[in-house]
Amino acid sequence: MKHIYLTHALNMESDAVLFSYPDFNTPNLILPKMQRELTPDSEIYITINNFYETNDFMIENTLIETIRQESAADGFIIDQIFTRDFHDVNTVLLETLSSEIRNKHFIIGPSFTKVPYFLHSRLAEIFIDHDVSGVMYDLRDIDIRNFSQLQPLAKLKMHVKKRLSIIPLIRPEQLKDLKRAYLLKLQ
């Protein structure tokens, strides 16, 4: 099981690191370049959201220009593609971002968890059609030992199978329970 560590500081120990502020805003973009120099073989992901910007045109251009200028990242986590209170996505922007990202990882951020669960499958199909490689699913506020709370995630996982990665976002203290569940699944 791979761990991607959320940080806003350089790290010499992690194999995969996600540079982001805790609210998933864009970090200091000098950090990914420095991390690449320090650990050339590590996977580096960055969030490119700007939740402080309210103008749609500026949001789109900021996202696109950040992708164009960022050469050290292996993937980008983006949340600012949702419309109508998380009921739909901006498919034109999604297509533009996909073509800019090209062969790097394109990951939808944890805002996906705000999407009503009955829309998960439909939006997942849109993501698959636009070369999205993964979706972050925020599990930090639930008891991961409670199956009923995990049911929307399980249904989504069954629907997308191996076409789209589901990336759980958890608190460090939830990791032990998640590892235990993973080991039980393997038996």
Image (cartoon, grey):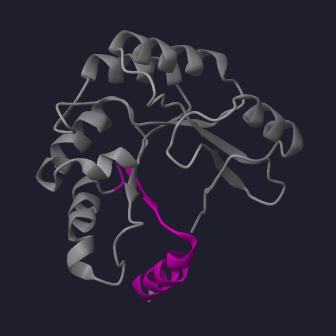
Q: Please report the bounds of the magenta region as a residue range.
A: 162-186
Residue 130: image x %, image y %? 33, 28
Residue at 57% x, 21% y is: 67
Closer to the camera, 1 or 109? 109
Q: Is residue 56 above or below residue 79?
A: above
Left or right: where does residue 62 sit relative to residue 159?
right
Left or right: where does residue 119 sit relative to residue 10?
left
| Type of secondary structure dominating the magenta stretch | helix
Residue at 17% x, 55% y is: 117
Residue 156: image x %, image y %? 24, 58
Left or right: where does residue 97 sit relative to residue 74?
left
- Quarter occupied by residue 126: top left
Whether the magenta-drawn stretch holds residue 170 is answered as yes
Q: From this viewpoint, which residue is outermost toward the left?
A: 118
Residue at 63% x, 35% y is: 27
Whether the magenta-drawn stretch holds residue 20 is answered as no
Q: The C terminus is located in which quarter? A: bottom left
Residue at 59% x, 15% y is: 68
- Quarter occupied by residue 65: top right
Residue 30: image x %, image y %? 76, 29
Closer to the camera, 106 or 112? 112
Q: Is residue 184 above or below residue 115?
A: below
Q: The N terminus is located in which quarter? A: bottom right
